[in-house]
Image: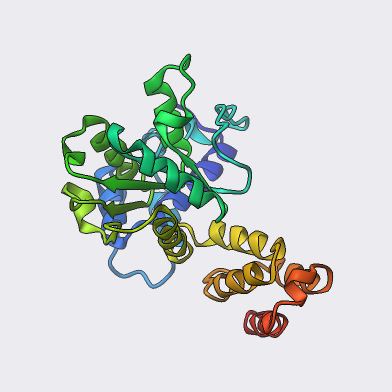
């Protein structure tokens, strides 16, 4: 397909954003498979590297690489309309929970617990309306999620649905968190660190997932926005103190955060009245100057 100069620029930038989250080995593998050059003599960041390697590619090569990542054709000036996803709350991290049918209760409890951390979850058996086509809705949730959480119970690997859900996420570069619930991860997921869910309650599991999401490279920026939102809206002294610990562990910082924290100290009595928190706010603002 023939691209305009504007479409090429937009598409190259979008592809670079998708690829920069991958490890160098995986990144080079992808580029080579699609006929683009690679180099082991690069000292810059991944985004610049990808742009440099693909900028001379022809239109068809760029479109094919974009389609591999599910990017709509070639930097079209008008984006396709977003599918209806009522299970995702605005401003929340979107979490797809992959689980066995018989373990829907635990999945639902984790879904509820994650919501207090600014994380919306999709649990197929609870969120799909009976009149909607099952597979289509699952595909939509997978295509629009930020993170997949796999609850690894015995026989998880034997489930074609669960296997396909995890495989889709890995293929699209979506972070996957595996939670051991009586069984260990298998296949590609076994390469990643698994959370130990054995003997733990849903709130305990949810808290660990939330903290891991804050630290995950691909999720850091979105989680930083979420953590700041949670903190400035703290509804009790204890909540403000707890959420301040999450603000302190952020690895990404936007210039808008500092004035928002200052305003919270002035206008939210639960923040200003929480022992030690105003001083912590002052220190964190100074750190990110």
| Residue at image location 62% in from the left, 32% down from the top | 77
Left/right placement of residue 127 relative to residue 152 reads: right
In this rendering, position of residue 81 left or right of residue 69 = right
Query: In terms of image quadrants, where is residue 34?
Result: top left
What's the residue at 29%, 41% (across, down)?
166
Q: Residue at x 52, y 40 (%)?
A: 8
Q: Is residue 287 above or below residue 95?
A: below
**In the picture provided, is 58 more to the left or to the right than 186?**
right
| Residue 264 vertical position relative to residue 82 in the rendered view, above or below | below
Quadrant of the drawing holding the N terminus = top left
Percent x, y for residue 67?
39, 34
* Res 66 seen here: yes
Residue 191: x %, y % from top left:
21, 57
Residue at the image point whose x is 26% and y is 62% from the top: 193
> Percent x, y for residue 92?
58, 48
Q: Is residue 269 left or right of residue 55?
A: right
């Amino acid at each position: 397909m023939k691209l305009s100069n504007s479409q090429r620029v937009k598409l190259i930038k979008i592809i670079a954003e998708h690829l920069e989250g991958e490890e160098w080995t995986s990144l080079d593998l992808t580029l080579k498979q699609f006929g683009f050059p690679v180099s082991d003599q690069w000292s810059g960041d991944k985004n610049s590297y990808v742009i440099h390697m693909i900028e001379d590619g022809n239109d068809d090569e760029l479109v094919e690489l974009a389609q591999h990542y599910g990017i709509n054709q070639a930097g079209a000036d008008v984006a396709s309309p977003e599918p209806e996803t009522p299970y995702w709350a605005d401003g929340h991290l979107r979490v797809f929970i992959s689980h066995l049918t018989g373990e829907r209760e635990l999945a639902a409890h984790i879904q509820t617990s994650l919501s207090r951390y600014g994380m919306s979850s999709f649990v197929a058996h609870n969120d799909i309306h009976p009149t909607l086509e099952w597979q289509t809705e699952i595909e939509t949730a997978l295509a629009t999620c930020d993170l997949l959480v796999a609850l690894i119970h015995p026989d998880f690997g034997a489930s074609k649905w669960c296997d396909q859900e995890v495989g889709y996420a890995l293929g699209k570069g979506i972070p996957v968190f595996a939670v051991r619930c009586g069984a260990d991860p298998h296949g590609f997921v076994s390469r990643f660190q698994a959370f130990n869910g054995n003997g733990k309650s849903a709130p305990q599991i949810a808290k660990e997932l939330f903290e891991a999401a804050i630290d995950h490279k691909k999720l850091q920026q979105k989680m930083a926005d979420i953590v700041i939102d949670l903190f400035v809206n703290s509804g009790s002294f204890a909540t403000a103190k707890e959420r301040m610990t999450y603000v302190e562990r952020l690895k990404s910082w936007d210039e808008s955060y500092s004035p928002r924290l200052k305003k919270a100290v002035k206008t939210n009595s639960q923040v200003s009245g929480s022992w030690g928190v105003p001083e912590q706010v002052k220190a964190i603002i100074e750190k990110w100057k």
